[in-house]
Amino acid sequence: MKDFIKYVFATVTGIVVFFLIMGILFVISLVGLAASSASSVPVEKNSVFTLMLSGTVEERASEDIVGQLTGQVSENMGLDDIINSIKKAKDNEDIKGIYLESGLFSIDTPASAHAIREALLDFKKSGKWIVAYGDSYTQTAYYICSVADKVYLNPQGMIDWHGLAANPYFLKDLLAKFGVKYQLCKVGKYKSAPEMMTADQMSEPNREQVTAYITGIWKVMLKDVADSRKIPVDSLNAYADRFIALADQPDLVKMKMVDKLLYTDEVKGEIKKMLKIDADDDIPQLSLSDMISVKGKKEKGEKIAIYYAYGDIVDSETASLVEEEHSIVATTVCKDLEKLANDDDVKAVVLRVNSPGGSAYASEQIWHSVMSLKAKKPVVVSMGGYAASGGYYISCAANYIYTEPTTITGSIGIFGMFPDFSGLLTEKLGVKFDEVKTNKHAAFGTVARPFNEEELSMLDQYIGRGYELFRKRVADGRKLSVDAVEEIAQGRVWLGNDALGIKLVDAIGSLDDAVKKAAQLAKVEEFKTEAYPAPIDWFEQIMNQTKGGNYLDEQMRATLGEYYEPFRYIKHINKQSAIQARLPYFLHIN
């Protein structure tokens, strides 16, 4: 018995010691990761910034400590990190050029691709070079890489250059198979978001506006590539019609789409020539993660805050379509903006908006916070890929609005979609209902039946009042009459270039332009910027793992591709606010 107790005690002691050692190693790993992320990366002379165009570009990416520890690191890149790294490469005298390499590349909006391209053009003003190479180029990757001094392609590679198309989803018939349908109340003939759930094809007003903005985006892409590659716009259009992705590679050189056909090792030789180093010398390279840790120019002066508001606009965290994805949570954003308003060190705020909209109620709450902030200091909006519907609602109160030329904005309209599950319950599942009530509308919103005509009329009036309020917010913010807003409202989506002419925005420009304008309005000559909200620290990331991780969601997205969006919508259908100010749910432009 004594031996048994001795062995049990030794086993338990061994297990405790093992977990203690593992815990210590885990803490050491965390400390090491935190220290490495905080340290500055040195830059060797004659270095090259290597920017791999692969993975997914989001508005803002945060460091995933848990992913680094588990090996489940996502390939997501932050647009802010990319643009800031290009700026640092421009200012660093030891970095001689940028090497772009095209891979499997996905970017959320044409405006984000345009922003990267503009940053690269600005880099070239320093007199430094850019070289691009790809085994193949997606259309978006080629659009960005066309800015390079030299564009190289693998001798067996391809360039996907085909034009733009929009492919909206319609789930009405799918839902009908389960006995589910939607009842709709909306204001605005162009307000097309509900069509996905209530129609089986595009309405004519929607087809009109989609045609207008994808044509506008394509014109911008054509002009930019034509200017960089010295190819006539007519020729680029002809190449798209011929679907040159299947063209013979030497013909791509004749078309001037690329400069030369080279293998990877041959590209290295070309770069070594540009660096004026020997063929057997190594090329000092800096990746995007390296550049994030490279010290930039030291800023001094007064503080200009850049507040990032991107994703769906929701009332609370539990209302997000997918909890792991970033959302503009009204309760959080309102508190953050109040803190910025009361922070005497912050002289002005740039609100970076990239949102297709969402909850109308949440949009109104954020609008109120922007107004309160504006009463104390200047507010300038910088529009990203989207600033539409609710995204425009929260923007319209600003002192000044900048947009990218291909930003999708406007969509001043509102709607309510109300799911009717009575068919599922009664016809498919055999559930029976009866009713007893004390008042006429006591059963308003019951799952037992759809809304009747009187109830729908009441909802229409409610939605109408919401639209009138939205329209007035725009009129007041943009100093327009309500009638003038009505002419450009009705849920109509506008491209940034077009929004300028109808006074929805003040200027075409980048985030940098918005920061300079904010400093000017605040009468500040020297300034430094600080991004908000602050990144989540490593301890909070670990604590938040109980809510579910992004990695599984990213794998689902990678597996399902373009079919992921309707899947996630149906999965979280019961979490959405019924009253919405937003774009079509999933806007696919390819």
Image (spheres, rainbow, N blue to C red):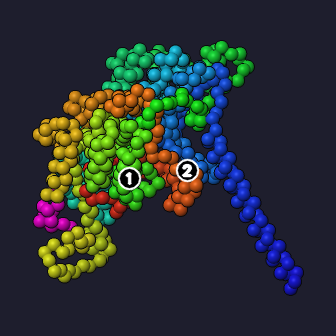
Residue lying at the far front of the rendered structure: 344
Query: What amino acid does circle 2 point to?
Result: Asp
Please indicate whether residue 141 sits to the left or right of residue 498 in the image: right
Closest to the camera, between mark 2 and mark 1, is 1
The residue identified by callout 1 is 335
The residue depicted at 25 percent of the width and 61 percent of the height is: 418
Return the x and y of residue 516 as percentages of the image width and height.
38, 29
Please indicate whether residue 248 sits to the left or right of residue 39 in the image: left
Query: What amino acid does circle 1 point to?
Result: Lys
Q: Earlier in the sequence, mark 2 or mark 1?
A: 1
Dot 1, how many residues are within 10 Å of its Cα: few (below 14), some (14-19), or many (20+)?
few
The residue depicted at 68 percent of the width and 55 percent of the height is: 27
Return the x and y of residue 102 as percentages of the image width and height.
53, 31
Q: Quadrant of the C terminus?
A: top left
Q: Give above or below for 257 relative to 357.
A: above
Q: Give above or below for 454 relative to 58.
A: below
The residue depicted at 65 percent of the width and 44 percent of the height is: 35
Q: Nearer the viewer, residue 205 or 302?
A: 302
The residue identified by callout 2 is 537
- Residue 511 visible, this angle: yes
Q: Give above or below for 442 relative to 376.
A: below
Return the x and y of residue 402 as percentages of the image width and height.
32, 32
Determine if the magenta segment contains residue 42: no
Q: Which residues are magenta?
A: 450-460
Secondary structure mostly seen in magenta is helix
Q: Secondary structure at mark 1?
A: helix
- Residue 451 bears which disc, if any? none
Residue lying at the far right of the rendered structure: 3
